[in-house]
Amino acid sequence: MQLCQANAAFMHILNFHQVPSSSLLLLGDSAGGHLLLMLLSHLVHGHPALPASISLQHPLAGILLLSPSTTHRKLAPSFAENCNKDIVRPEVYECWFSAFCGPAISTPEGLEADGWWTEHLGTPKGWWTGLGTTISKRILLSAGEHECYHDDIKAFARKLVEEMKGEPMDLVFHLEKWDVHNSLCFYPPGTAPEELFELVAAWVTESLSD
C-alpha cells in the first residue's frame, strides 16, 4: 500500500505537475528511507502488482537517505555493539521487522515474489545495476556511529558501489561520529549535528545547482 501511494505521488508530480525529473531530489529517513528504496527498486524493476514504472527523461537531481532501513534482519554486529547507545533498542527494531514482514515475505517463495522490493541489502547480485544510469548518479547515505543500523547501512553503500561499477556514480557515505539513528530529526532546531547538517545542506545545494 505504501509503495503504491509513493509511486502514485511520484507519477503525479511528474505527469500532472510536469516537474522535470532533473529538478527532483528524493529524501527518505529511517522507514522513509526504506520506502524510498522500495520506490527506486520499482523504477529499476517494475513491481508486478503496480502500474508499470516509467522511464525518466532525465536522471533525478539526487537521492538522500538518512539512516535508512535496508534489511529485515537483525544480525549485524552493530546491533549488539550499540544496543545501549542507540535511541532505538534492538528489540524495538525486531518488533517493527516482524510487524512489517508478516507472512507475506517470511518464506523464500514470498520473498522472491515481493520481498526483493523490500529487502534492499539482501537483493540478488546486480539488482541495483542501472540505478546510476537511469535514476540518479548522486546518492548520499548517512548513518550514526552508535546506531544499530550502522553496519547494514555501510554494507548497503558498498553494495551500491559494487553493483553500479561502470555507471555514472557520485555516491557519498557519511558516518556521523558519536551519533545515533536518524540524528538530524531528533535534535531541537539549531542544535543538529554540525558536520552532518552542513554536509546535507551543501549536498542539496550542489545537487539542485547542476
Image: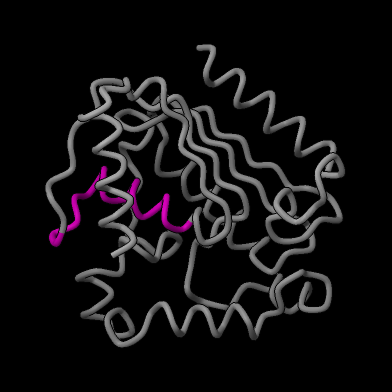
- Residue 54 higher or lower than 42, as above or below: above
- Residue 91 higher or lower than 49, as above or below: below
What's the residue at 12%, 46% (across, down)? 52
Front-lying residue, 103 or 145: 103
> Main SS type for the magenta part?
helix
x and y, in percent, of residue 191 in the image: 87, 44
Quarter containing the N terminus: bottom left
Q: Is residue 20 magenta?
A: no
x and y, in percent, of residue 124 in the image: 32, 60
Number of disc labels = 0
Residue 4 relative to residue 148: left or right? left
Residue at the extreme top of the image, as rendered: 210
Residue 83 relative to residue 66: left or right? right
x and y, in percent, of residue 162 in the image: 46, 43
What's the residue at 26%, 44% (across, down)? 44
Front-lying residue, 154 or 98: 98
What's the residue at 52%, 48% (across, down)? 28
The image's colour scheme reads one colour
Q: Which residues are magenta?
A: 34-49
- Residue 109 higher or lower than 189, as above or below: below
x and y, in percent, of residue 35 in the image: 42, 56
Residue 209 sits in which quadrant? top right
What's the residue at 26%, 43% (across, down)? 43
Residue 100 relative to residue 57: left or right? right
Residue 188 relative to residue 55: left or right? right
